[in-house]
Amino acid sequence: MFEELRVPVLVAPMAGGPTTPELVAAVAEAGGSGFLAAGYLTADALGERIAKTRELTSRPFGVNLFVPGRKSDVDLSPYVRRIEEEARHYEAEPGDPRWEDDDYPAKVDLVAAQRIPFVSFTFGLPSTSDVARLHEAGSQVIVTVTTPEEAVRAVEVGADALCVQGFEAGAHRGLFVDDPEHPAGGEVYGLLALLRLIGSAVDLPLIAAGGIVHGADVAAVLAAGADAAQLGTAFLRADEAGTQLAHRKALAEGGRVTAITRAFSGRPARGLVNRFLTEHSPYAPSAYPQVHHLTKPVRAAAHAAGDPEGVNLWGGQTYSVAPEGPAAEIVARLKAEAKAAQERVTRRLG
């Protein structure tokens, strides 16, 4: 699927701002590719980002969609009261904890009409009819999976490839179903173990995601059976990324551990530990996107105040050694590091 890439590196679809058209285009021009994040956008806004990316590059790129889940019936009132208290720190008001489908049907229509080369799905499975529509439009369908069982189900709906997400990954876990009884939402697998298990269970091209920040990591997942590596945290400090200032500073400073939390969105996601995560994680319900909408204005106010203690500092476990600079330089560095790793292995094995 990605044989034409000069560098088997893909920018992850980091919703909420970090993955910009400029970032995707820069990586594509440097020999890789990437995915625009459709999450939290209207179909019209996504259309604008697709158009902008096409202005910046003629290289192929993808779009990632959030699959809407079932509306949670959990009582949100205790958590609403906590976030009301949190909002007072910033003289803000909490948002409306509403459920909605993220404009999903309209965005499926859009990517089919735009004939996007690669369309990936996170948080669940597209319907077989949507997969068929996308195939008719010439798109290849990729499903994010976190377990071998999810991988088998993705094959059944007609997926062309899988994005295999290890627990090391920053931001949201791509679980089909968030188990509220499990702190991480479900079974956790390290990336290399998951590649091995899924590669044994299905016969599809695999994209590896989770904790990849160095070219040696890229070489490792290719050796483990992946066709390409998807990197998010590695590009959060790229010049072209839309990462907000408080987030950039926390990533650059290092020193924080990471943890999986539902505190910001109601879905398990890995971020750098701060006050908000510490205080609210034990009480956060499994209720996405209601919690996301509830906390969004408070997080925006914390960003405006430049306070890293009140925002979601998404990042993978290896964030502290992720690079910064122009995206093209990051891609070139990854390629050189991967080649050096390959040479070391060749020497070691004779």
Image (cartoon, rainbow, N blue to C red):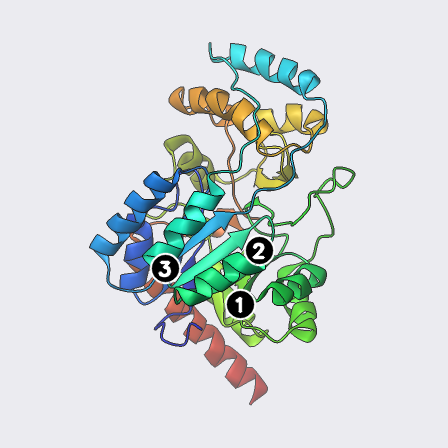
Give left or right: position of 236 versus 320: left
Q: Residue at x 25, y 55 (%)?
A: 54
Q: Nearer the viewer, mark 3 or mark 1?
A: 3
Q: Which mark is residue 116?
A: 3
Q: Regarding mark 3 in the picture, which secondary structure is present there?
A: loop
The residue lying toward the viewer, choosing from 346 and 105, is 105
Whether the residues at callouts 2 and 3 have beta carbons within 8 Å, the answer is no
Choose the circle earlier in sequence order: 2 or 3: 3
Can you say whether 196 is above or below 231 in the image?
below
Can you say whether 154 is above or below 15 in the image?
below
Q: Residue at x 33, y 54 (%)?
A: 24
Choose the circle earlier in sequence order: 1 or 2: 2
The residue lying toward the viewer, choosing from 33 and 277, is 33
Choose the circle earlier in sequence order: 3 or 1: 3
Q: Which mark is residue 1?
A: none
Give left or right: position of 24 versus 85: left
Taking the view exactly as shown, the residue that stands out farthest to the left is: 55
The image position of residue 173, as x and y in percent, is: 60, 47
The image position of residue 219, as x and y in percent, is: 50, 71
Q: Regarding mark 2 in the picture, which secondary structure is present there?
A: loop
Q: Which quadrant, please, contains the N terminus?
A: bottom left
Q: Which quadrant, please, contains the C terminus?
A: bottom right
Q: Residues within 10 Å of mark 1 (few under 14, many from 20)?
A: many
Residue 185: name its quadrant: top right
Q: Mark 2 sits on what residue?
A: 127
Q: Regarding mark 1 in the picture, which secondary structure is present there?
A: strand
Q: Nearer the viewer, mark 2 or mark 3?
A: 2
Q: Mark 1 sits on what residue?
A: 161
Q: Do we see residue 41 in this rendering?
A: yes
Residue type marked 1: Ala
Q: Residues within 10 Å of mark 3 (few under 14, many from 20)?
A: some
